[in-house]
Image (cartoon, grey):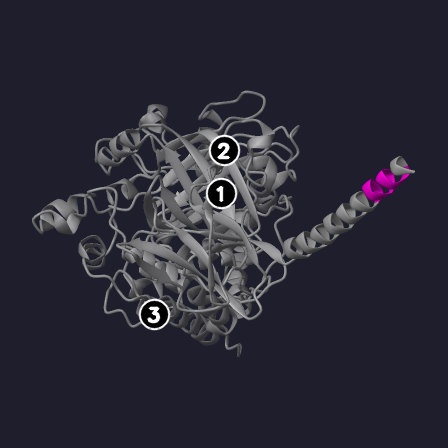
Amino acid sequence: MLCNLCNSLVLIHCTSYIAVFAVFAVVSAAKAKDQITYSVISLEGGRQDISVVVDTISYPLLQSAQVPVLYTGSAPIASKDYKYSMSTGRNSMKTENFSRNKTEESTPNETFGRPWNTRVLSKLKSALPPIPSIDRIKSLLHIDGEIATIHLSGNQSAFDNMHNNPMEESLVAANVSYISPHGIHTFSNVELEISGLSSRTFRKLSYNIKLKKKAKNHLYGYRRLKLRAINNDDSYIRESIGYDIVKAAGLAATEFSYVRVIMNDRPLGLFGLIENYKDPWLSNEFANGNVKYEQGILYQAVYQVDNGNVNITLSDLSYYQNITKYETGAYKIKADSTNGIASLDPLIEFTKFIKDAPTDTPNAVHIWNKKLDTESFLRCIALEILLGFSDGYIGTGNNYYLYLDPKTQRYIYLPSDLDLIFGAGFISTVSMTTGNYSDFPCFHLRPLIAKMMQIPTFKTRLEELIVEITKRLYNLKELENRIDDVVDMIEEDVAWDCSLPRVSKGLILGDIDGSEEYSLSLIPPMVDIPTALNLFTKNETIPLRVAVNGPTGHLASPGVKEFIKWQSENTMEFWHNTTGEIF
């Protein structure tokens, strides 16, 4: 009997314990259910003490060991709202001056001080169908209405040496973290270098990023990227809107998005992220990312290189009987063909074709179309004119690529480096906005244009494109909403960028004893001297909204909208006066 009683008491005790445990489990589960993960990016650099303030109670967040600029932690679901706070030292806190709407799900990777994660931007309508050769992958690299953050980490001494000697070619090993609102990607042992030519002279530098070749190390399908410093553009939108227009015109080119960049503990600012036209870009653009794609050779125009002697060789597709001139550096083989061709010979042959090709025979158009995707070229030339691209093929014989498509054995023309558009640069704005495309400086000097304009079919097509693009795309009615939305999105980040010290001492011509003689020696030929001097010696910063809307009071950088209005209205007026047609 006693044993049975003991067994009964043990059973009652165990049952009670199980019941109590079950109650605690339910309470704990309910409590856990009321918790979500909060994630926020700090743009300050270094380590901070960051908390999320849910309603009125503060909960500390932990710094990510893998991504040091990211802070995460669990806290209750807000009943009303939440915000983030950060220690600024000496027992003081900086708290966001706005509240975030409550959410019952874990937050995206938010950014401290930015009240939004994703914005809805107006989109441009397609003005022309894509050229047939385009077969671009679908990628999440450039998400419209989002600004990702890139954290570069590595040996600080190596970074300092790179920045202190920007004119030297040097590769630095770095780790890269890419943090978007909805994803994190980390890469180790990445090759980082300063990019560009003249851009190396600025205090804020641009960079090339090269990820490892293994497919799993690609960032949304791309392994070679550029961080564009957005120098010379107080509007911060020229390249962004420029590449939007290029895409709407159906051309092959990189796309563009904004990123915030931090290097170790130092914020570098707001950059543009674009794709580098190197492997695997060609397969991504023309073969939907097919890893078995047998690519052709890609040539890059590099203006001219010969110790500053601007009269030696231009990358304007002139033909030289002395083929050693092609080796001075005006052209670069950007990508070899899959079959191993890494020679300038095909390009030399193409320049000879341009020189000798027929213009008045019945089969002239057919012969040209067998060598060149003439539609891609004429569209790009129409855009160079309308956008006022002072540093493109027309203006300087520069900033373009020629891709020898292995399927058609034709060259496809690719635009690049659209920083000096919408009238920015060293060509007279007046001369670019007469409305008559043939007034554009150097238009008749470029061999490929001069030859093609002798063929009525191509001349007529260029004129059709200029009118069609102006009517359907290049005017404020079509562009203004997009421009305004992009400016609204980046305004806080532009202010942040402008507040940051730069990593390089730079070589700003206006800082060199005001030496006009020195400046003039670096100005490309056939440009407007007052405009060029204004470009190279302007020291003041134009406020963002003024730089966008105008008037700016600067020859070399009119307001973006201001230039679009001049160009579109004058173009339509010229064609009305020429044809009598009412547009």
Apparent side of residue 466 relative to residue 498 in the rendered image (left or right): right
Q: Position of residue 249 (x, y in %)?
A: 55, 57
Q: What secondary structure characterizes most of the magenta part?
A: helix
Residue 254 appearing in the image: no
Q: Residues within 10 Å of mark 3 (few under 14, many from 20)?
A: some
> Residue at position x 53%, y 68% from top?
81
Is mark 1 in CB contact (under 8 Å) with mark 2? yes
Judged by depth in the image, the label closer to the viewer, 3 or 1, is 1
Left or right of residue 428: residue 117: right
Q: Give the number of callouts.
A: 3
Question: Helix, strand, or loop for circle 2?
Answer: strand
**Amino acid at pointer 3:** Arg
Report the disc number at residue 187.
Answer: 2
Q: Where does label 1 land, which residue?
A: 178
Give amino acid for label 2.
Answer: Phe
Kindly identify the residue that appears in the image at 83 percent across and 46 percent down: 12
Q: Bounds of the magenta span? A: 4-11
